[in-house]
Amino acid sequence: MKPFGKRTYSGPIAFLSDWIYLLSHVRRVALAVGKKGVSPQFRERLMLAVTQVNKCRYCAYAHTKAALAEGVPQEQVRQLMSGAFEGCPEDELPALAYAQHWAEAGGKPDPAIRQKIVDTYGREKADAIELVMRLICACNYTGNAVDLVLFRLSFGAIGG
């Protein structure tokens, strides 16, 4: 059987830790994705950048659809899902590159790179950006866990 090639939680403690954190900070999450936080188009671009790294097919589908509904051009969505940022707004490029780095580092980014994001956007917006990334990463890992179950039950035929 081929190996499962998607990022998932390392175990139930990691899963519970992420979801307990997000649920206990539901107000901050709502603000981060609401009108006072990250704009809907920016939020969807961040979510697609993280999802591209984590390869969750459920989130890729849902956030492609959401991005298009928010007015993100189809070509931008295609670029983001291939790991590129051509055509994205210039002021979002540092955050999109950070989102990729953050996801590749499993949510443990280089402190110097994180500081550059704080310097670029300010602490409040940087925290909102990171909260959006944490939310989508938790969803990616959860979706990928579903695929891991399907993968194992189908002996590698589904979900890998």
Image (cartoon, rainbow, N blue to C red):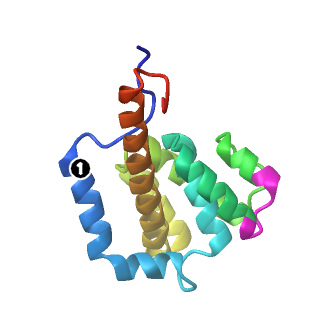
- The span shown in magenta is 69-76
Task: Say which quarter of the image contains residue 89.
Answer: bottom right
Q: What residue is shown with label 1?
A: 14
Q: Residue at x 44, y 16 (%)?
A: 2
Is any part of residue 93 visible from this angle? Answer: yes
Image height of 1 relative to 23, above or below: above
Is any part of residue 94 visible from this angle? Answer: no
Q: Residue 29, position in %: x, y?
A: 41, 75
Q: Residue 70, position in %: x, y?
A: 72, 70
Q: Residue at x 47, y 69 (%)?
A: 126
Q: Residues within 10 Å of mark 1 (few under 14, many from 20)?
A: few
Quick one: which residue is furthest to the front in this view? 154
Q: Nearer the viewer, residue 40 or 102?
A: 40
Image height of 53 relative to 14, above or below: above
Q: Is residue 19 magenta?
A: no
Q: Amino acid at mark 1?
A: Ala
Image height of 89 relative to 106, above or below: below
